[in-house]
Structures are given as C-alpha cells and as structure tokens.
Image (cartoon, rainbow, N blue to C red):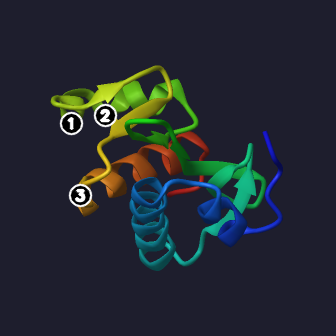
Amino acid sequence: MAKFENLEDFYKSLPVDQATAIRRCVDYVASAYPQFELVLAWNQPMFRVGTKYILGFMPTKNYINLATVSPDVITGLGESLVGYRHGGRTISLPFDWQIDAAFIALIVELRLAELGLVS
C-alpha cells in the first residue's frame, strides 16, 4: 500500500464515493474539534492530541470505518451502537451516513476520558 504525502493524495487514491464520504467526516471533525491535529497515520486520516490518537477514518470497499482506536470506546458506547456494524475498535458507516454530531461527541468524550485528557 502506498504511503501518501498528504491528505489530497489520500483522497485522490479513492473512488469518488469513498473520497466524498471520508472527506465529509474528516471535515466535520476538523471543524468541530479544532484542537485536534489531523495527520495521516497508518495511511489514513487520524486525529490526535499530542501523540495520543482520538479517532480516524479508513476506507473499505463498502463502508467507512470510523476507527475509535480503543476497544474500551466501543464497549463504552453501549446502546449507542444499536444499528451499527462494528468490530473491536471500528464502526462501519455507510457512504451516505448523515453525520451524527452527538454520536461523534460521545466517541470523542469516551476516548479523551480514557486518555485522562478531560477533567
């Protein structure tokens, strides 16, 4: 797999539907959480605070995988995951997913708490 020099190279490598969907999610998180640094890590867009990763987005053939980075976040989401396909650290989102600000906020809150980055 290619190592991308920047986010635009990453987007250009994807089919249009995937690129559009991931760009929408990345843009939302970047605007809602300007204190997070957007980086390419593991060849995908990831948000971090310092050296601690908060969440990211990975393309798959049929979904966007929202990477929560931690299995504890998945466990902490509990009933909020009803209706979502998920694994131990990822949540599969359809390309036409309408951003659920409260759902993203809960993921961020759980991850920041896990890292001890909230009071």
Q: Which residue is mark 1?
A: 80
Amino acid on which the number 1 mark rests in the picture:
Ser
Left/right placement of residue 50 relative to residue 117 reads right
Say which residue appears at 39% left-offset and 59% top-offset: 21
Q: Judge whether 82 appears above or below 108 on screen.
A: above
Does 77 sit left or right of 32 as displayed? left
Q: Which mark is residue 77?
A: 2
Q: Residue 1, percent across and down?
A: 78, 39
Between the C-alphas of marks 2 and 3, the distance is: 14 Å
Which residue sits at x=46%, y=73%?
27
Q: Residues within 10 Å of mark 3 (few under 14, many from 20)?
A: few
Are circles 2 and 3 on residues that touch, CB within 8 Å?
no
First along the sequence among labels 1 and 3:
1
- Residue shown at 40% from the left, 71% from the top: 28
- Place of residue 68 in the rendered image (x, y in percent of width and height, measured from the top left): 50, 39
The residue nearer to you, when weighing 114 against 69, is 69
The front one of 93 and 12 is: 12
Please report whichever mark, 2 or 3, sits nearer to the chain's N-terminal start: 2
Please provide percent x and percent y for residue 36.
60, 68
**Disc 3 target residue:** 100
Badge 2 local density, few (<14 within 10 Å), some, or many (20+)?
some
Q: Total label count?
A: 3
The kind of secondary structure element at disc 3 is loop
Whole-number angstrom distance, CA of label 1 to CA of label 2: 5 Å
Alpha carbons under labels 1 and 3: distance apart: 11 Å
Residue 35: percent from the left, percent from the top? 59, 75
Give neighbour class at mark 1: few <14, some 14-19, many 20+ (Cα, 10 Å). Answer: few
